[in-house]
Image (cartoon, grey):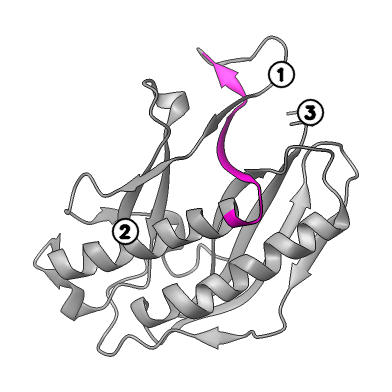
């Protein structure tokens, strides 16, 4: 698929290894102007500090955050930045981790209906004490919800918007380019664990 610009938007990638496999969460931020290298640096550092302060305590010890990478997707060859000053950092949640594919789906809400207006964050690195059979414990759900809500607050604190970027509609490129939906609420709809098969051993390069 040819490059489709998303004006004013950067992509944020949280790059980690989980039991030796490369894994990643990514999301988009609208900086409300043409992204600069300084914007990329500021966002990367903020997300890195967020992981250290909020996420590290909730993930297994075999999860190692390697770096935060941010790039402009406003143009084909835009600015980028990588933050690794405090990394690598391993998770500190004690106990045996569940298989790599086990994740909790966290819903990113925008206050608007339709699949294009919602996103999901698949939380990985879950340990046995955080689940009861196939269901996440209520305390763990509360902690993960609070952690990602804090990330939303950190992005807003920079003066930017966490957004869902929709490039297509009805399986076709959107006429006029991508549409953005501002994330304003984090919630866990279903406490049952999900599966992310790409995170299984041998899938992450």
**Which corner quadrant holds the C terminus?**
bottom right
Q: How many marks?
A: 3
Residue 43's place in the image compared with 72, above or below, is below
Q: Main secondary structure of the magenta part?
A: strand
Label 2 vs 3, first from the N-terminus: 3
Label 3 vs 1, first from the N-terminus: 3
Q: Is residue 188 left or right of residue 178?
A: left
Residue 194 image offset from top left, x and y in percent: 27, 53
Dot in front, 3 or 1:
1
> Could you tell me how far apart the alpha carbons at marks 3 and 1 are, in whole angstroms?
13 Å
Name the residue nearer the viewer: 92 or 22. Answer: 92
**Residue 138 visible:** yes
Residue 103's place in the image compared with 126, above or below, is above
What label sits on residue 2 in the rendered view?
Answer: 3
Query: What kind of element bears circle 3?
Result: loop
Dot in front, 2 or 1:
2
Dot in front, 2 or 3:
2
Rendered residue at 49%/68% (across/down) = 202
Residue 29 image offset from top left, x and y in percent: 64, 45
Answer whether labels 2 and 1 touch (C-beta < 8 Å). Answer: no
Residue 160 among magenta residues: yes
Where does label 2 land, which residue?
145
Q: Is residue 137 left or right of residue 35?
A: left
What label sits on residue 123 in the rendered view?
Answer: none
The range drawn in magenta is 157-169
**Residue 69 visible:** no
Label 2 vs 1, first from the N-terminus: 2
Query: What kind of element bears circle 2?
Result: helix
What label sits on residue 177 in the rendered view?
Answer: 1
């Amino acid at each position: 698929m040819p490059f489709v610009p998303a004006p004013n938007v950067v992509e944020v990638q949280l790059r980690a290894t989980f039991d030796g496999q490369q894994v990643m969460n990514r999301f988009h931020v609208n900086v409300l102007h043409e992204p600069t290298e300084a914007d990329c640096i500021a966002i990367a550092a903020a997300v890195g500090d967020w992981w250290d302060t909020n996420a590290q305590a909730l993930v297994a010890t075999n999860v190692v955050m390697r770096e935060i990478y941010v790039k402009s997707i406003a143009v084909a060859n835009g600015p980028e930045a990588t933050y690794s000053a405090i990394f690598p950092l391993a998770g500190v949640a004690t106990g045996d981790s569940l298989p790599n594919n086990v994740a909790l789906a966290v819903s990113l809400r925008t206050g608007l209906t339709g699949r294009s207006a919602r996103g999901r964050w698949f939380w990985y690195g879950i340990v046995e004490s955080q689940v009861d059979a196939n269901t996440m414990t209520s305390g763990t759900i509360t902690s993960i919800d609070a952690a990602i809500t804090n990330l939303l607050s950190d992005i807003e604190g920079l003066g930017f918007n966490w957004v869902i970027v929709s490039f297509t509609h009805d399986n076709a490129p959107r006429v006029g380019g991508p549409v953005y939906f501002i994330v304003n609420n984090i919630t866990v709809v279903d406490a049952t664990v999900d599966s992310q098969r790409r995170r299984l051993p041998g899938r992450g390069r």
